[in-house]
Every structure is written in C-alpha cells, then in structure tokens.
Amino acid sequence: MAGFFSKLMGKADSGNTPESAQAAHDNIDPFDRDYGAGEDRDSVIYQVSGMLLSYPTEETLDLLPEFTRLAQATENPDFVQAVQTVADWLTARELEEVQSDYVQEYDLSRRHALHLSYWTDGDTRRRGETLLRFKKMYRDSGMLTRLNGELPDYLPLVLEFAALVDRRQGRAALQAYRPSFAIPSPVSLPRLRNRCSRWRVMARPLRPLV
C-alpha cells in the first residue's frame, strides 16, 4: 500500500519541473522556509554568542566561566576558541575601557553593525518592511520579547530568540540574512590586536549554523 501511494504521489508530481520547483521555493517568505531545528548544542552556541556580542556588563564577566564550560561541552573547536578569545579581551582591561571600545566599534561605527538587515537593505524603505517582518516573527511566537531599545533585527536578540523561543524559526530568520555573516569578512584570530572585533570572532562558528 505504501508503494502505491508513493507511485500515486510520483504521478501527481510528474508535471513539476526543476524550474517550477525552484520558482515555488523562491516565492516562499524566507522566514517561512524550514531549515530544520538543528541540534540542541546549536541553542548553546546561539545563546552564548548572543550574550558575548551584547554590551559588556559586570554580569557578562561573572558568566565567563560558565560560557567557557558551555563552549567546551559543544565540542566545537571554533566556538571554544572564539569564546576564549572574547573572554581574554573582556578581562584584559578595566570594564569601563572595554565598554568604551564596544560603543566606539558597534554603536558609533557602521563597520561592525550588529543589525542583520543593515548589510542587505541599508537605510532604505525596504529595511522598514524587513524590521516589521522581524517584529511579526516575535509576535507570532506568542512569547513576550523585550527589544530594550534595539531594532528587532539586532543580532544578539535574534540569537536569543533562536536559542530560547523557537530554534526552527530563528534559524530561518538567520538564514534569510546569511550574507550579513560574511560582511565584514572574518580575520584570523592571531591578527586580532588591542581592539577585538567580536563580530568577526563569533561569526566564524555561527556561519555553519545559518
């Protein structure tokens, strides 16, 4: 009987050409595409990366040992190295100096903007529509998401959503803006000097997951 239904479905689909299938795929809202839920350890990488990419606070420093332990548990060498590199940067100087660098690098400069649609849409009308789509994703999840003054495409926020609320939907949103993870291009870890670009460091282990 199973073979019968397989043949029946095969006949029903026989009119679909690769071109028509691709056209149908392209017409799907990128946020509605299903890339699967991934693995449980992906949630760990999303959550820790999101927190390490956020504005550094005393709480961030207090959680560094836990972040290191969680990174090691993922058995992902790139992620372990990224977490250690950022942890070293966070603890090398006084917190106030690190916070000042963060503001200069991520808030006052666009070289490492942490807003996903900035790299694809820029400051255009299209970006406004994109931000509404992110808001809809949060609203449809049924979970209360606090933006805390950030735009809804703020990468740490999207990563937290993927880790704690809906990994499947979060992966779709991240995949929709995958090109943002290649801009700016990564640098090798030894080249990082006084000012650590956490975007570049953390983007490396994130790329395979989006």
Image: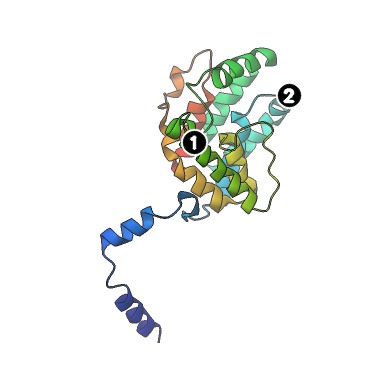
Q: Quadrant of residue 131?
A: top right
Residue at x 29%, y 61% (from the top left corner): 20
Circle 2 sits on which residue? 58
Residue at x 69%, y 14% (from the top left corner): 96
Instruction: Check the image and report above or below for 194 versus 181.
Output: above
Q: Secondary structure at mark 1?
A: helix
Judge depth for marks 1 and 2 and give the one in front.
1
Assess whether mark 2 and mark 1 are in contact (beta carbons under 8 angstroms): no
Residue 47 picture location, percent across and down: 61, 40
Locate residue 157 relative to residue 119 in the image: left or right: right
Residue at x 69%, y 50% (from the top left corner): 143
**Which of the two labelled residues, at mark 1 and mark 2, occupies the earlier sequence position?**
2
The residue lying toward the viewer, choosing from 91 and 32, is: 32
Residue 117 picture location, percent across and down: 49, 35
Residue at x 44%, y 42% (from the top left corner): 208
Q: Label 1 crowding class (10 Å Cα cut-off): few <14, some 14-19, many 20+?
A: some
Q: Label 2 crowding class (10 Å Cα cut-off): few <14, some 14-19, many 20+?
A: few
Q: Which mark is residue 127?
A: 1
Q: How is the image coloured?
A: rainbow
Residue 144 picture location, percent across and down: 71, 46
Q: Quadrant of residue 63?
A: top right
Locate residue 84 relative to residue 186 in the image: left or right: right
Q: CA distance from mark 1 to mark 2?
A: 34 Å
Seen from this angle, which residue lies furthest bottom? Answer: 1
Locate residue 63 relative to residue 177 in the image: left or right: right
Disc 1 marks a residue whose amino acid type is Arg
Disc 2 marks a residue whose amino acid type is Glu
The residue lying toward the viewer, choosing from 208 and 117, is: 117
Seen from this angle, which residue lies furthest front? Answer: 125
Residue 186 picture location, percent across and down: 42, 27
